[in-house]
Image (cartoon, helix red, strand yellow):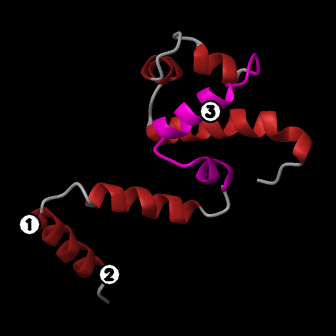
Amino acid sequence: MAYDYLDYPNFIRERITELRLQKGVSSRDMSLSLGQSASYINKIENRRTLPSLTGFLYICEYFDITPQDFFNTADKKTQKNKHLLAELEKLSPKQFEHISLLIKDLTEK
């Protein structure tokens, strides 16, 4: 999605909505997780306000992405891979081996 410099407010709102829906959380739950009022994200998504810079950084942290990742929508595969790698790092060595074998089995032709 290409935006000109005048459309950053809409880009920010739409990107927050997109990331929130991908994460599968309600605007209320996200707002409360950020330590804000229950309607904070709803007000952003419905064009009533924009987050402050600090608020924006907390939103990026909530989604476990960098501000650069927030604005870089062209390479979603890289973002998905980054998330998958982060999840794999949480596994025990035995669990990791199981996943590796499963992937190898699924990708063999």
Q: Which residues are magenta?
A: 47-72
Instruction: Tell me the element at label 3.
Output: helix
According to the picture, the residue beneath numbered tag 2 turns out to be 107
How would you rate the neighbour count of disc 3 (Cα within 10 Å): few for under 14, some for 14-19, many for 20 or more? some
Q: N-terminal of the two: label 2 or label 3? A: 3
Across and down, in percent, residue 82 comes to 44, 61
Across and down, in percent, residue 65 comes to 51, 48
Q: N-terminal of the two: label 2 or label 1? A: 1
The residues bearing labels 2 and 1 have C-alpha atoms spaced at a distance of: 20 Å
Q: Is residue 96 left or right of residue 24?
A: left
The residue positioned farthest toward the front in the image shown:
54
The residues bearing labels 3 and 1 have C-alpha atoms spaced at a distance of: 38 Å
According to the picture, the residue beneath numbered tag 3 turns out to be 56
Q: Amino acid at mark 1?
A: Lys
According to the picture, the residue beneath numbered tag 1 turns out to be 94
Across and down, in percent, residue 27 comes to 53, 22
As drawn, 36 above or below 75 = above
**Foreground disc of the pair 3, 1:** 3
How would you rate the neighbour count of disc 1 (Cα within 10 Å): few for under 14, some for 14-19, many for 20 or more? few
Q: Residue at the spot x=27%, y=60% of the render?
A: 88
As drawn, 4 above or below 52 = below
Name the image quarter holding residue 102. bottom left
Q: Amino acid at mark 2?
A: Thr
Q: Residue at the spot x=51%, y=59% of the render?
A: 79
The residues bearing labels 2 and 3 have C-alpha atoms spaced at a distance of: 39 Å
Q: Amino acid at mark 3?
A: Phe
